[in-house]
Each structure stands twice: as C-alpha cells, then as structure tokens.
C-alpha cells in the first residue's frame, strides 16, 4: 500500500516547488483549508476547474441499524461535505497509476 501524504508532506512538497518557506506555505495551505470549511459551513459550494468541486449534501433523518448489535438506531437529519473529482483529475490519476503499475 502506498504511503499516505500528510499535511506536513504537502507543505514540504509545495515549498520545495515554489521557493516559498515552509512557514509561508503552511499559512497558505491552512488558509485554503479554512476557506473551504468556511464556505461549506455557509452553504456555498466551491469549484476548482480541472480539479473538482466541493458541496454540501443534506441527509434526511432515517432509521438505521447498529451492525454489531442489530439494535435499531435513529439517525437525525445532517449535512455532509462532498467532493467530486473533475474528469481531468480522474484521467490524470488513471494514467499515472497505469504508468506506475507497468
């Protein structure tokens, strides 16, 4: 299984690629993540062409079942963030994985 990148790994990679300091890069990445969260909390979607889009989906209240005990559980109405990858993003990942697995 491939190693998972952490936020620190992303900061290091972006800093190396842009010439910005790690501190500057971390501030930018934190700012981006906070902007996404703030926008979604306020009901606004975000679209980044060539990458994907973020939006919030409402899940209706429902009766569910605890898989361990089989007990019926009521799940209240709630909202979940959704990310949909763009076609370009999916194509790039597919090509990269095919090259990696040759």
Image (cartoon, rainbow, N blue to C red):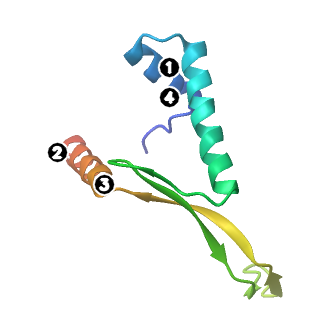
Q: Which residue is mark 4?
A: 10
Badges 2 and 1: C-beta atoms under 8 Å apart? no
Can you tell which mark lies on residue 58? none
Q: Quadrant of the C terminus?
A: top left
Badges 1 and 4: C-beta atoms under 8 Å apart? yes
Q: Which residue is mark 3?
A: 90
Q: Is 20 displayed left or right of 81 in the figure? A: left
Residue at image position (50%, 35%) is 5
Assign a secondary structure to mark 1: helix
Badges 2 and 4: C-beta atoms under 8 Å apart? no
Residue at image position (48%, 12%) is 20
Residue 82 percent across, percent down from the top left: 55, 62
Q: Quadrant of residue 73?
A: bottom right
Q: Is residue 40 above or below residue 1?
A: below
Give how far apart the Cα atoms at labels 1 and 4 are.
5 Å
Q: Residues within 10 Å of mark 2 (few under 14, many from 20)?
A: few
Give how far apart the Cα atoms at labels 2 and 3 are.
19 Å
Q: Which of disc 1 and disc 3 is earlier in sequence? A: 1
Give how far apart the Cα atoms at labels 2 and 4 are.
26 Å
Give how far apart the Cα atoms at labels 2 and 1 are.
28 Å
Give how far apart the Cα atoms at labels 3 and 1 are.
24 Å
Residue at image position (50%, 39%) is 4
Residue 42 percent across, percent down from the top left: 69, 56
Q: Which of disc 1 and disc 2 is earlier in sequence? A: 1
Q: Residues within 10 Å of mark 1 (few under 14, many from 20)?
A: some
Q: Is residue 45 above or below residue 7?
A: below
Q: Is residue 76 above or below residue 2?
A: below
Residue 13 percent across, percent down from the top left: 44, 22
Can you tell which mark lies on residue 12? 1
Q: Which residue is mark 2?
A: 102
């Amino acid at each position: 299984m491939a190693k998972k990148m952490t936020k620190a790994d992303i900061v290091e990679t972006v800093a190396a690629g842009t010439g910005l300091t790690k501190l500057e890069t971390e501030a930018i990445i934190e700012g981006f993540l906070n902007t996404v969260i703030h926008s979604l909390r306020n009901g606004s979607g975000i679209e980044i062409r060539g990458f994907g889009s973020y939006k919030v989906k409402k899940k209706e209240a429902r009766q569910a079942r605890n898989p361990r005990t089989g007990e019926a559980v009521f799940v209240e109405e709630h909202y979940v963030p959704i990310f949909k990858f763009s076609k370009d993003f999916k194509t790039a990942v597919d090509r990269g994985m095919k090259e990696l697995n040759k």
